[in-house]
Image (tube, rainbow, N blue to C red):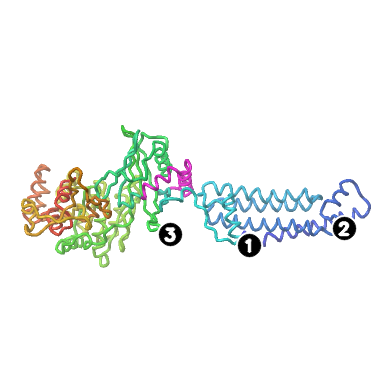
């Protein structure tokens, strides 16, 4: 169809044949064989008063229809190819066959004005059928032959005006757009969900949802909790790992009807049932975030999960940022000695190294940071991860994936991975006991195996692995180090205030009692009638903290610790014995890093206590 001229040749031959046929008709008419039909055909048909020739005006009209058909048919072909329409051949064939048949029929119908509508219908019916089917799943801005599209086309193409396209309701307001997404989800389903969410009830709920997400991202939130109550809607943002009630999330409080529209638009976007307010539902969507309004939006995946609660319904939105906030150990740790220890662990020749943290404490970031620090150029690195839980790309690591949605586990691919004899294997989420047992065996082949585990500190990681079912003797022989991380909120540099250290705090943390430390600014109450000069801090939203930094509990396993791990003893006794051995070997855990951060004014004592006591 791109080379449409090849289809004009049979039409030209058909036209010549028709001319010959009509010329024979003229000879018959000249012989005096007149009847009423012949007379009408002579007056109103192709010839009129032109005798043996065709009427050039009527022939020109038919030629215009033919050229218009050629142009629109070529557009249908190119458009369907661009959109990847599987029915492209059907549209091309239907348009071609229908028009050729109608074109030939029009030439043979003796009355011109009776044949012309046949040509027009054969051209327009397939064309508008394609447009109808094409527009159905499209966003309003991408539809064709709509009044707004025709108006825009006429003003820009015909009148040559520089016209900005009119924004649709879902394009106004916040510099955020939402798209349905999901692994292995058909593109047409994604488009359909996006369109339905945007157009639901005139885009009101969709736009309210956008406003909330923009405000949350602008406030550095990682999660948003929305409680849809019977009387009011409450919001909480998780900022730097702590939930904060938010009163200015929306310009004005949502009415019950507005809150319902938000919940419905969000559920439609992820393919959930908008009418179900009790069951646990959820899904994945994507945020296109143009924070600086420069036309280059950032893509951020997010999940939403809803469930009915006694007060109404609770929704949780989690932002899944694609890149880690830190790139190497120098960015998350300011202590050169601690940096050297982390590099030494990740560059070990062999053994089992476990990276751990409590939930929401940056385990993915820790993994990325450690491997960005590792020597990936002189050794063979292979990564194993779940396609349903992707991690950030790390250069020079060959990634092998499995799909948990299909019932696959790390053991689906690990035998093949180990068969290729890599020197270093990173198993992102070792979720099965068989995978841990195999890892302990593979360490004997002079291999370094690194994986992750959820636990609050290094010793708890070892106890957790034993509880999981890993054989004590195997773990004791394979394990070489555990690196556990917690994230401490940093004081806001704009509003933090210095204080004299409390003697008990200084003694507990080993601080210099003569050196000032810092704390979060305190809003002191004023006496009634006095003016309050306190000005909230815009940089940290008056939280007092801005950003987070890591503290580490790095436990390098020695022979004494291996003996405790392998011993036939109660897990509680093993926990106590391991902590005593760690302290005896000079490993102070999180407290050592935390004390340094308090002394240097990076964080304060209260935040350090909150971090160390959190599970």
Ranked by sequence position, the earlier of labels 3 and 2 is 2
Closest to the camera, between mark 1 and mark 2, is: 2
Foreground of the two, 549 or 12: 549
Q: In terms of secondary structure, what is the magenta stretch mainly?
A: helix
The image position of residue 461, as x and y in percent, is 18, 49
Residue that carries the numbered disc 2 in the rendered image? 51
Label 3: few (<14), some (14–19) or many (≥20) C-alpha neighbours in 10 Å: few
Residue that carries the numbered disc 3 in the rendered image? 295
User: In terms of secondary structure, where does tag 2 sit?
Assistant: loop
Tell me the magenta residue range. 185-214
Residue at x 52%, y 55% (from the top left corner): 165
* Contact? badges 3 and 2 (CB < 8 Å): no
Residue that carries the numbered disc 1 in the rendered image? 3
Foreground of the two, 163 or 46: 163
Q: In 3D space, how far apart are the residues under numbered discs 1 and 3 (Cα atoms)?
A: 37 Å
Label 2: few (<14), some (14–19) or many (≥20) C-alpha neighbours in 10 Å: some
Foreground of the two, 485 or 577: 485
In the rendered view, would you say 578 is above or below 230? below
The image position of residue 601, as x and y in percent, is 16, 58
Residue 437 can be seen in this image: no
């Amino acid at each position: 169809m791109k080379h449409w001229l090849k289809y004009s040749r049979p039409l030209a031959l058909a036209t010549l044949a028709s001319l010959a046929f009509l010329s024979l008709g003229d000879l018959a008419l000249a012989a005096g064989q007149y009847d009423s039909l012949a007379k009408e055909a002579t007056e109103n048909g192709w010839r009129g008063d032109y005798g043996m020739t065709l009427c050039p005006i009527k022939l020109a009209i038919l030629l215009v229809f033919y050229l218009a058909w050629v142009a629109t048919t070529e557009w249908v072909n190119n458009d369907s190819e661009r959109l990847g329409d599987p029915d492209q051949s059907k549209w091309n064939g239907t348009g071609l066959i229908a028009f050729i048949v109608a074109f030939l029929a029009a030439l043979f119908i003796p009355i011109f004005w009776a044949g012309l509508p046949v040509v027009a219908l054969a051209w327009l019916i397939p064309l508008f059928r394609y447009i109808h089917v094409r527009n159905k799943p499209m966003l309003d801005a991408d539809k064709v032959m709509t009044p707004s599209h025709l108006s825009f086309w006429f003003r820009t193409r015909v009148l040559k005006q520089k016209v900005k396209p009119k924004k649709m309701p879902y394009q106004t307001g916040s510099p955020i757009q939402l798209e349905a997404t999901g692994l292995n989800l058909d593109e047409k389903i994604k488009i359909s969900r996006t369109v339905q969410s945007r157009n639901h009830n005139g885009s009101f709920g969709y736009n309210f949802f956008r406003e909330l997400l923009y405000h949350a991202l602008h406030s550095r939130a990682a999660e948003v909790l929305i409680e849809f109550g019977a009387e009011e809607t409450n919001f909480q943002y998780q900022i730097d790992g702590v939930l904060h009630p938010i009163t200015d999330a929306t310009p004005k409080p949502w009415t019950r009807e507005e809150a319902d529209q938000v919940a419905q638009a969000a559920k439609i976007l992820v393919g959930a049932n908008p009418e179900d307010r009790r069951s646990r539902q959820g899904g994945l969507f994507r945020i296109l975030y143009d924070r600086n309004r420069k036309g280059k939006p950032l893509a951020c995946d997010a999940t939403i999960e809803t469930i009915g609660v006694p007060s109404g319904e609770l929704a949780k939105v989690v932002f899944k940022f694609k890149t880690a906030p830190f790139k190497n150990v120098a960015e998350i740790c300011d202590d050169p000695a601690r940096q050297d220890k982390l590099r030494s662990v990740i560059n070990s020749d062999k053994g089992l190294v476990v990276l751990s943290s409590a939930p929401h404490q940056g385990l993915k970031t820790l993994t990325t940071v450690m491997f960005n620090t590792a020597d990936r150029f002189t050794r063979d690195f292979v990564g194993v991860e779940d396609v349903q839980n992707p991690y950030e790309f790390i250069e020079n690591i060959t990634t092998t994936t499995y799909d948990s949605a299909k019932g696959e586990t790390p053991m689906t691919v690990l035998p093949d991975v180990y068969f290729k004899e890599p020197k270093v294997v990173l198993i992102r989420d070792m979720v099965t006991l068989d995978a841990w047992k195999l890892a302990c065996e593979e360490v004997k082949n002079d291999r370094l195996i690194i994986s992750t585990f959820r636990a609050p500190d290094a010793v708890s990681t070892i106890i957790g692995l034993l509880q999981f079912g890993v054989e004590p003797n195997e773990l004791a022989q394979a394990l070489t180090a555990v690196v556990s991380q917690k994230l401490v909120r940093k004081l806001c540099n704009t509003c933090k205030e210095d204080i004299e250290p409390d003697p008990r705090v200084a003694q507990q943390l080993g601080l210099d009692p003569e050196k000032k430390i810092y704390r979060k600014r305190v809003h002191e109450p004023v006496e009634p009638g006095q003016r309050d000069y306190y000005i909230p801090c815009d940089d940290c939203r008056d939280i007092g903290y801005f950003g987070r930094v890591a503290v580490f509990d790095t436990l390098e396993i020695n022979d004494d610790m291996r003996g405790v791990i392998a011993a036939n003893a109660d897990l509680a006794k093993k926990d106590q014995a391991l902590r005593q051995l760690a302290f005896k070997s000079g490993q102070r855990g999180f407290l050592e890093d935390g004390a340094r951060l308090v002394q240097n004014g990076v964080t304060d004592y209260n935040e350090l206590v909150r971090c160390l006591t959190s599970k």
